[in-house]
Image (cartoon, rainbow, N blue to C red):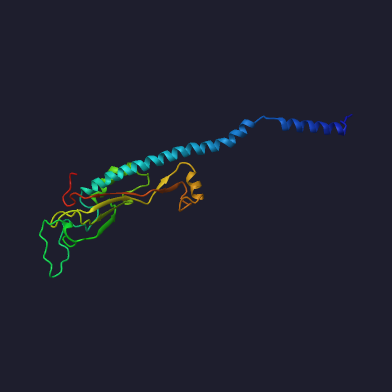
């Protein structure tokens, strides 16, 4: 014979169990951990990422100074750069300037060949030497092709018949910095970078250093 509890007692028991369940705090720590842990990991890896970014930025700045110094005392990394200063264009009535005259003594004392620019190439010994010195300071996806060189005429440098002395500029560009955390995706969604589809990478700042050349024609020993 089965004895059933009166319905009011069943309802009272259910209400009691519901109140007990509402007061129960078992597992609260796990819930809090599940909420806090992803935020903590994001901040932790963010600190690592931005530390790496700051290191590469400072190291790349130092590396570019080394690159410009080497480029200023080595044969050109670009083809078509003159070796000597030739006379500038003269009118029929002009008296040709003497060899040895400073280029700054007149607008047409030395010819202005303009600016010669090129991208770094593994086939060029100067570009290869520079790349071997600085590649460790740049992000991992960098190649010698991320370097660019330019040789710009400066009338304040050199003399007629002497070695061509341009302003040498070495620039690193078109690099991306790889994150180990999803921070770059969040930055991309915020609109802070031009391309939010870069995934785990953001554009690495371009930087350049310029120096007057010293001996582009014969420089071999720095």
Q: In the image, residue 108 lies at what x, y percent?
A: 17, 62
42 left or right of 103 in image: right
Report the residue at 17% width, 52% height from top: 217
Indicate the quadrant where residue 3 lies: top right
In this rendering, the count of numbered labels is 0
| Residue 100: x %, y % from top left | 11, 56
User: Which residue appears farthest toward the bottom when viewing the image?
Assistant: 92
| Extreme residue in the front direction | 105
In the image: residue 6, left or right of residue 128: right
Which image quadrant: the N terminus? top right
In the image, 92 versus 31, the foreground residue is 92
Q: Quadrant of the C terminus?
A: top left
- Residue 87 at x, y = what percent? 15, 62
The answer to whether residue 93 shows anywhere in this view is: yes
Q: Of residues 69 and 16, which is closer to you in this image?
A: 69
Residue ID at (22%, 48%): 72
Going 34% across and 41% down the picture, which residue do you hit?
59
């Amino acid at each position: 014979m089965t004895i059933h509890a009166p319905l009011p007692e069943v309802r009272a028991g259910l209400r009691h169990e519901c109140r007990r369940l509402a007061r129960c705090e078992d597992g609260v720590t796990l819930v809090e951990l599940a909420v806090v842990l992803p935020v903590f990991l994001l901040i932790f890896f963010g600190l690592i990422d931005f530390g790496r970014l700051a290191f590469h930025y400072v190291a790349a700045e130092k590396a570019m100074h080394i690159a410009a110094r080497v480029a200023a005392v080595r044969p050109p990394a670009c083809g078509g750069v003159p070796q000597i200063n030739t006379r500038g264009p003269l009118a029929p009535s002009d008296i040709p300037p003497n060899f040895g005259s400073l280029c700054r003594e007149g607008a047409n004392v030395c010819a202005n060949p303009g600016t010669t620019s090129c991208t770094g190439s593994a086939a060029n010994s100067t570009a290869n030497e520079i790349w071997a010195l600085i590649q460790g300071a740049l992000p991992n996806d960098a190649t010698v092709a991320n370097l660019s060189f330019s040789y710009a005429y400066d009338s304040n440098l050199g003399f007629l018949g002497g070695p061509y002395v341009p302003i040498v500029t070495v620039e690193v560009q078109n690099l991306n910095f790889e994150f180990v955390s999803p921070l770059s995706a969040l930055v991309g969604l915020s609109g802070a970078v031009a391309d939010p589809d870069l995934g785990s990478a953001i554009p690495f700042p371009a930087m350049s250093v310029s120096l007057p050349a010293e001996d582009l024609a014969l420089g071999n020993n720095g």
